[in-house]
Image (cartoon, grey):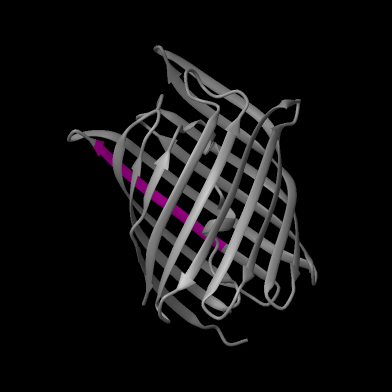
Amino acid sequence: MKCIKKSVFSFGLASGLVLSTSAQAIVNIESLRMDAEQLGWSSSLNLSGQGKKGNTDKDAVKVGFGVQFVEEHSRTFLIGSVEYGEANQQKDDESYFAHLRHTHDLIPTWAWEAFTQYEAEPLVYDKQRSLLGAGLRKSVQAKTLKWHFGMGAFYEHETAILNNTDLTTDLGRGNFYTTFKQQLNDHASWFGSAYYQPQLDAWNHYRAIATLGAESKLTQRISLSLGTSYGYESSPLASAKKEDLAYQFGIQVNF
């Protein structure tokens, strides 16, 4: 098999409104996946700006990256990001994220996947979260539609500092998601996804998020995207809100 290496640099400008930040414990990995149709190595780099309102009012810049290796029946990718924000010339946001995942085909429409993830928010109760999990992934592809469904579980370790008290949580969560992307014509598509992550020993404690958006190619290299998401966490930390509503729009340039 001939190995092809492709590098992609993307520059994005985004604006968003967030009513709270509690449900952001779920990261929409599906929206961050890179194109898997190209065999071999590929990479991406993204720079975006964002504004938020809610638990905090801020302006932020976010740098994201992705590296993946695709073979005929398997795929391994690493994605990550660093976010920094200020309000009134004071640092009010700092976060780090990394996700490593391997997917291997079992039969043409089913695959197993294993993943690990790390997140940190030093300015929000000094929260840190790491997880390790696995699951199954179902894929269906029609002429203009790609649909995926995943189910599995992961072990989650979270730490935080609240009122000078160290908090530690270790638990298992189920992981269920569905996602689709439909090509409307040669230049436009729309997409959506939904995640549900219940606590395995108490299913009434859960996190969920749903997203919906559209993308339009302005030229071969430049595309415009618009999306919105709604998240819910049944038992958020401290005074954080249970609900989270966000929207964003951006321009991406590939080189």
Please report the residue visible at 36 percent of the width from the left and 77 percent of the height from the top.
255
Residue 189 sits above or below residue 15 on the image: below
Residue 226 sits above or below residue 143 on the image: above
Measured from the top left, where is residue 163 in percent x and y? 40, 12
Measured from the top left, where is residue 133 in percent x and y? 67, 45
Please report the residue visible at 43 percent of the width from the left and 20 percent of the height from the top.
161
- Quadrant location, the N terminus: bottom right
Q: Is residue 182 left or right of residue 27?
A: right
Whether residue 215 is visible here, answered yes or no, is: yes
Q: Is residue 108 left or right of residue 95?
A: right
Number of marks: 0
Question: Residue 231 magenta-drawn?
Answer: no
Measured from the top left, where is residue 219 in percent x and y? 40, 80
Q: Nearer the viewer, residue 246 or 139?
A: 246
Prevailing secondary structure of the magenta residues: strand
Please report the residue visible at 32 percent of the width from the left and 36 percent of the height from the top.
93
In the image, the segment drawn in magenta is 77-86
| Quarter assignment of residue 88 | top left
Q: Is residue 231 left or right of residue 161?
A: right
Please report the residue visible at 47 percent of the width from the left and 80 percent of the height from the top.
5
Considering every residue shown, the one lying at the far left of the view is 89
Whether residue 26 is visible here, answered yes or no, is: no
Q: Nearer the viewer, residue 88 or 77?
A: 88
Considering every residue shown, the one lying at the far bottom of the view is 2
Measured from the top left, where is residue 101 in percent x and y? 60, 56
Residue 90 sits above or below residue 38 on the image: above
Q: Is residue 133 left or right of residue 225?
A: right
Residue 201 sits above or below residue 19 on the image: above
